[in-house]
Image: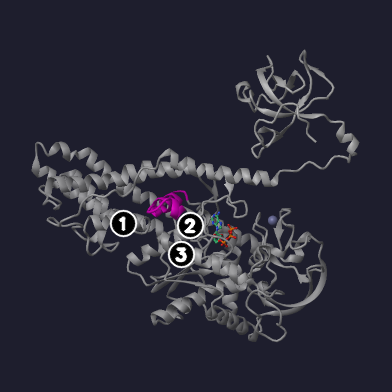
C-alpha cells in the first residue's frame, strides 16, 4: 500500500475467564504496543483498539461451576485485565468490552445487514443435544476426536492441537462437556455464512496478494484451509449468554462468539471516536487506512478467513493489510495453562517485580515466538536482565551521567575536534532509527529489540575504548569531545527505546532533562541530539541486578503448581475386597518407637530397625532407606503390625511391619499417633 493516512491496530480481545499471562503478552500485546508506540513517534494517526471478549461457552461453564452469573465472571476479569494492561504500559486508545451496549448494537446491526442482503443460508439441521442438560451442544460444550489429526480433546468449534476449525457434528465420538453423556441429534434452525462463496476472493486477496508480505506461518495456515475447501459456517448458537439473534426465528439463540468478537474491534473504535469527537468510519472503511490485527496462531482462521468474509459480505469495509500472528510461548518447557496454573500471571508479576515492567517487556520481545513456539525460562529472564539491561544499557547510561556530573557539573560539554572514531560513531547512531524502523515495519520485533540493544552496545564500547576517565588526566579537550559524543548516544537511546522500554525511556528523558522529546526521525535528521551547555540531571539506576533468590522463588512457585497438579491427578488405588470385623481384629497393630537404625549393607532400600513395641524390642527390616537416613528415624513413634509372620530378608529376620504412606512428592512418611509420647505397646483399634 502507498503511505497510509491512518492506522487501525487491533489486538485479539482477551477472553474474560482469567487474568493475562506472559503467553498473551508475548504473542499479542507487547508486539502490538511496540508497533503502535513506534507509529505515534513517527507522527502517524493511529487508533489502537482493544477490549474484552465476554461471550461464549467457557464463561457460562465457569459461572456454572462457581455458582455465580456469567456477568459476575466477566465483570471480575474485565476489571483485572484492563488494570493490568494499564499498569504494564499497553497504551490503548480504547479498551472496551463486548457486553457494552454499543457493541450489542453494532454486532446486531452487522448481522441484520448481512441477513437483509441475503448473505446467510438459513438451515434447519440436526445438532448435538444433551438430553439430560436439556441443551444443544456447540463449541466447548462438546468434546470429541478431531477428524483431521485424531486429537481426542478437540472442541465443537476448533481443534487446539492442529488448529482445524470444526463444526460440532464433525467430531468423532462426541461427548457432552456438561454431563459426559453421548449426545443425541435434534433439529434446530441456524444461520450459516457460506465461506465457499468467498473462496475466490480470499484466494486472490491472500494467496495471490499477500504471498510476500504475510508471515509464512500465517500464509501457510490460510492456504491449507483454502486448499481443504471452505464450507458454510454456522454463526448462531442455541445459548442464552451472548447477543440475541435479531431476526425472525432467532428467539432463544445468540450470535456465535467468533461472529461477535471481531466486530468488537469496530464497536471499540466507535466508542473511542465518539469520545474524541472523531468520525470512526475512515478507520474501517477508507482505503488509505492500514488495518493490522495482532493475534496468536489459534486465532488465524477467524482473522484471515471468517472475519474478512463477514466484512466482504457487508461490503463497505476494508481488509486487513496484515495479520502478523505469532506462534505460542511456553513456560519452562511446558504449555501455558490456566487450569493447571502453569503461567506467569501479569497481575502477580506487577506485584512481585514493582517498577520492572520493562524487564518483562524486553525479555518477551527478545524471546518472542515469532517464527516458532518458544520457551520462557526464569534463568533466561535473569540473564537478559543482568547481562543486557544492567550490564550494557544501564551501565552505559550510568557512566555517561555520572561522569558528566563529575566533570562538568551536569552540563553537556562543547566538543573540540572530532576524530574519525567520533564521526563514525555519530554516523552509526544516526543510522539506527531506520534500521529499527525497518524491522518493526516488517513485524520483526525480536530483531528490532536486539538492534536497540546494539545501539546501547555501541555506546558502551565507545566509552570503554575511549576511556574518558583516563584521558581526563592528560587531555581535557579530548575528554569533552568523548563525553559529548556519548551524550548524543544517550539521547538517541532515550527516544528509540520508547516503544520497547517505555518506563525506562521516560526515566531516561527525565535524567537527561529532555523537555521536548525528539521524534523518531529527528534522531536521524537533527545535527545535535543533546546540545552543548544543556544541563542534565543526576544519575538514577535504570535497571537493577536480579538475584538468584528472586529467581528461585519463582521456580519454587512453579514447582508447587506442578506438585499440586500431580497430587490432583494421582490415581487412587481401587478399594480391596471387603473383609469382616473378625478379619480386622486379627491384625495386632501397636504404637512403637524406633530405637536403633542402620543401613542394610549392599542394599539401596533397606534399613534394619530396632523397634520398642511395648512387648519387646524386635528387629524390623523396612524398605525406607531412599526416603530416610538412619539417624533421622531414631526416636520416631510408629505404627507396627506386630503379628505379621516373620520373614528373612538378606539373612536378617524381620519381625513385623511399620505402616507407611506417601506424601504429595512421593516421599514415604510414617503413619504415627497424632499426639506425642503415646506409651509403646498400646493397641490400635
Ligand atoms: N501461550 C501463548 N503464546 C502466544 N499467544 C497466546 C498464548 N496464549 C494465548 N495467546 C493469544 O492471546 C490472545 C488472547 O488469548 P485468549 O484470551 O483468547 O485466550 P486463549 O487463546 O483461550 O488462551 P488461554 O487458553 O491461555 O486462556 C489470542 O490471540 C491468543 O492466540
Ligand atoms: Zn486436530
Q: Which residue is drawn at 70% across and 58% down?
A: 154
Dot 1 and dot 3 residues touching (CB under 8 Å): no
- Horizontally, is 202 left or right of 568 in the view? left
Residue at coordinates 66% horizontally, 20% vertically from top-left? 595
Confirm or deny contact between disc 1 and disc 2 (CB under 8 A). Answer: no
Rounded to the nearest angstrom, the CA distance separating label 1 from label 2 is 22 Å
Residue 570 figure quarter? top right
Question: Which residue is pictured at 38% across the width and 70% down the height?
Answer: 3
Location of the N terminus by quadrant is: bottom left
Tell which of 53 and 576 is nearer to you. Answer: 576
Q: Mark 1 points at which residue?
A: 505
Q: Name the residue under label 3.
A: 83
Residue furthest to the front in view is: 679
Residue at 71 percent across and 21 percent down: it is: 611
**Part of the protein shown in magenta:** 349-367
Where in the figure is residue 405, as x and y percent of width and height? 16, 48
Farthest top residue?
A: 651
* Location of ligand 1 given as a quarter of the image: bottom right
Quadrant position of the C terminus in the picture: top right
Look at the image and say whether residue 416 sits in the magenta stretch: no
Q: Quadrant of residue 152?
A: bottom right
Dot 2 corresponds to which residue?
Answer: 347
- Where residue 567 appears, as percent x and y from the top left, is 67, 44
Who comes first in sequence, dot 1 or dot 2? 2
**Residue 89 makes an appearance in the image:** yes
C-alpha gap between disc 1 and disc 3:
22 Å
Look at discs 1 and 3 and give the one toward the viewer: 3
The percent position of residue 384, horizontal first and vertical second, equals: 40, 44
Asked whether 579 or 320 is in front, the reply is 579
Tag 1, which secondary structure?
helix
Q: Kindly report the distance in space between the C-alpha atoms of the residues bearing marks 2 and 3.
A: 9 Å
Amino acid at each position: 500500500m502507498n503511505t497510509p493516512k491512518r492506522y487501525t491496530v487491533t489486538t485479539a480481545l482477551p477472553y474474560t475467564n482469567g487474568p493475562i499471562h506472559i503467553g498473551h503478552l508475548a504473542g499479542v500485546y507487547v508486539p502490538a504496543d511496540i508497533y503502535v508506540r513506534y507509529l505515534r513517534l513517527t507522527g502517524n494517526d493511529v487508533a489502537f483498539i482493544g477490549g474484552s471478549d465476554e461471550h461464549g461457552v467457557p464463561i457460562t461453564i465457569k459461572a456454572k461451576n462457581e455458582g455465580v452469573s456469567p456477568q459476575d465472571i466477566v465483570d471480575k476479569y474485565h476489571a483485572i485485565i484492563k488494570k493490568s494492561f494499564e499498569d504494564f504500559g499497553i497504551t490503548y486508545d480504547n479498551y472496551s468490552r463486548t457486553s457494552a451496549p454499543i457493541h450489542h448494537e453494532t454486532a446486531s446491526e452487522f448481522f441484520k445487514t448481512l441477513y437483509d442482503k441475503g448473505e446467510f443460508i438459513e438451515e434447519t439441521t440436526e445438532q448435538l443435544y444433551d438430553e439430560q442438560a436439556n441443551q444443544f451442544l456447540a463449541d466447548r460444550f462438546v468434546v470429541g476426536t478431531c477428524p483431521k489429526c485424531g486429537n481426542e480433546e478437540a472442541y465443537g468449534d476448533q481443534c487446539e492441537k492442529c488448529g482445524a476449525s470444526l463444526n460440532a457434528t464433525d467430531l468423532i465420538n462426541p461427548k457432552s462437556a456438561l454431563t459426559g453423556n453421548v449426545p443425541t441429534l435434534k433439529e434446530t434452525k441456524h444461520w450459516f455464512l457460506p465461506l465457499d462463496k468467498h473462496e475466490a476472493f480470499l484466494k486472490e486477496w491472500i494467496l495471490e496478494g499477500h504471498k510476500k508480505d504475510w508471515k509464512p506461518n500465517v500464509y501457510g495456515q490460510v492456504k491449507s484451509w483454502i486448499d481443504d475447501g471452505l464450507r458454510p459456517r454456522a454463526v448462531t448458537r442455541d445459548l442464552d449468554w451472548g447477543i440475541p439473534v435479531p431476526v425472525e426465528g432467532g428467539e432463544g439463540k445468540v450470535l456465535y462468539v467468533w461472529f461477535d468478537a471481531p466486530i468488537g474491534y469496530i464497536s471499540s473504535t466507535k466508542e473511542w471516536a465518539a469520545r474524541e469527537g472523531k468520525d470512526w468510519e475512515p478507520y474501517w472503511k477508507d482505503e488509505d487506512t492500514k488495518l493490522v490485527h495482532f493475534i496468536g496462531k489459534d486465532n488465524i482462521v477467524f482473522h484471515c478467513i471468517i472475519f474478512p468474509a463477514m466484512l466482504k459480505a457487508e461490503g463497505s469495509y476494508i481488509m486487513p493489510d496484515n495479520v502478523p500472528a505469532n506462534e505460542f510461548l511456553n513456560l519452562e518447557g511446558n504449555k501455558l495453562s490456566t487450569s493447571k496454573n502453569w503461567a506467569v500471571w501479569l497481575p502477580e508479576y506487577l506485584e512481585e517485580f514493582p517498577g520492572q515492567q520493562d524487564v518483562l517487556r524486553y525479555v518477551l520481545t527478545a524471546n518472542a515466538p515469532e517464527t516458532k513456539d518458544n520457551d520462557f525460562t526464569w534463568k533466561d529472564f535473569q540473564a537478559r536482565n543482568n547481562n543486557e539491561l544492567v550490564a550494557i544499557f544501564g551501565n552505559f547510561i550510568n557512566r555517561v551521567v555520572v561522569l558528566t556530573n563529575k566533570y562538568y557539573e551536569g552540563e553537556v560539554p562543547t566538543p573540540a575536534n572530532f576524530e574519525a572514531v567520533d564521526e563514525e560513531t555519530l554516523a552509526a547512531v544516526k543510522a539506527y532509527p531506520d534500521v529499527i524502523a525497518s524491522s518493526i515495519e516488517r513485524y520483526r520485533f525480536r530483531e528490532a529489540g536486539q538492534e536497540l540493544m546494539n545501539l546501547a552496545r555501541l555506546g558502551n564500547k565507545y566509552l570503554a575504548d575511549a576511556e574518558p576517565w583516563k584521558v581526563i588526566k592528560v587531555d581535557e579537550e579530548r575528554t569533552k569531545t568523548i563525553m559529548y559524543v556519548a551524550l548524543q548516544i544517550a539521547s538517541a537511546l532515550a527516544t528509540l527505546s520508547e516503544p520497547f522500554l517505555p518506563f525506562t525511556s521516560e526515566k531516561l528523558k527525565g535524567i537527561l532533562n529532555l523537555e521536548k522529546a525528539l521524534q523518531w526521525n529527528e534522531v536521524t535528521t537533527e545535527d545535535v541530539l543533546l546540545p552543548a551547555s544543556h544541563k542534565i540531571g543526576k544519575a538514577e539506576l535504570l535497571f537493577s541486578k536480579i538475584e538468584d533468590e528472586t529467581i528461585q522463588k519463582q521456580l519454587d512457585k512453579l514447582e508447587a503448581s506442578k506438585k499440586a497438579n500431580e497430587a490432583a491427578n494421582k490415581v487412587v488405588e481401587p478399594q480391596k475386597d471387603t473383609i469382616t470385623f473378625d478379619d480386622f481384629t486379627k491384625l495386632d497393630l501397636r504404637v512403637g518407637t524406633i530405637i536403633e537404625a542402620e543401613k542394610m549393607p549392599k542394599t539401596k532400600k533397606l534399613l534394619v530397625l530396632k523397634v520398642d513395641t511395648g512387648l519387646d524390642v524386635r528387629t524390623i527390616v523396612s524398605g525406607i532407606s531412599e526416603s530416610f537416613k538412619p539417624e533421622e528415624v531414631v526416636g520416631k513413634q510408629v505404627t507396627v503390625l506386630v503379628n505379621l509372620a516373620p520373614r528373612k530378608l538378606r539373612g536378617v529376620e524381620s519381625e513385623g511391619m511399620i505402616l507407611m504412606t506417601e506424601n504429595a512428592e512421593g516421599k514415604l512418611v510414617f503413619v504415627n499417633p497424632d499426639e506425642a509420647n503415646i506409651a509403646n505397646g498400646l493397641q490400635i483399634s
